[in-house]
Image (spheres, helix red, strand yellow):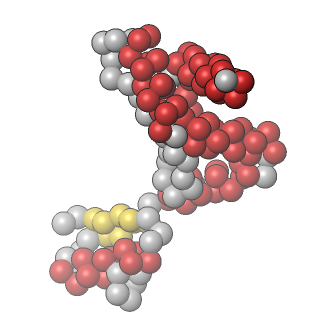
Amino acid sequence: MVSQGYDEASVISSHCTGVQTRVQELAPNALYVHCYAHVLNLVLVNSLRRVSLASEFFVLLEALYVLMSSSNIHVLFMKRQQQSNPYKQPLELQKLSDTRVCRYAAVNAICRTFDSILLTVEEAADLSNFLQWK
């Protein structure tokens, strides 16, 4: 083993009892390199929280994820994707998380399925209005 690299999780990188220490005991020449990509991601997430427009955008993304994940709307969303692109596997929207680099994946999924999202929301609103007045 030449080197080891981990995120900030204490169970992994702790110098007393973590995996880093155990590996060091077995392979004393294995260098430990802290994974700064995780730290950078957390810095970016916390910075974006301080920009109100960005913060509101990600709150909206999370609300959209919750809406599109609800059972009836999710089925409708999958059908709309199949209809618009029958030869492609439907995409799932991504839940946001601070602990992994997922915001790009969440935004990308919305961009790639935007037309299907609009059709789904419009149809769900029409069905909701229909059922409300029935």
Residue 132 drawn above or below residue 84? below
Looking at this view, is 62 or 127 the one in front? 127
Side (left or right) of 63 relative to 5: right
Seen as rendered, the residue at the extreme front is 134
Side (left or right) of 67 relative to 33: right
Q: Position of residue 86 (x, y in %)?
A: 34, 12
Residue at (44%, 65%) from the top-left corner? 7
Residue 7 drawn above or below residue 107? below
Residue 24 drawn above or below residue 131? below
Q: In which quarter of the image is residue 30?
A: bottom left
Q: Does residue 104 appear in this view?
A: no
Q: Position of residue 124 (x, y in %)?
A: 60, 25
Residue at (49%, 33%) from the top-left corner? 72
Residue at (35%, 81%) from the top-left corner? 18
Residue at (67%, 24%) from the top-left corner? 134
Q: Does residue 129 appear in this view?
A: yes
Looking at this view, is 52 or 14 the one in front? 52
Total numbered badges shown on the rendered structure = 0
Quadrant where the N terminus sits is bottom left
Residue 41 drawn above or below residue 125? below
Q: Quadrant of residue 131?
A: top right
Seen as rendered, the residue at the extreme bottom is 16
Q: Where is residue 84 in the image (x, y as percent from the top left)?
A: 44, 10
Looking at this view, is 29 or 35 the one in front? 35
Q: Where is residue 71 in the image (x, y as percent from the top left)?
A: 47, 38
Looking at this view, is 32 or 70 the one in front? 70
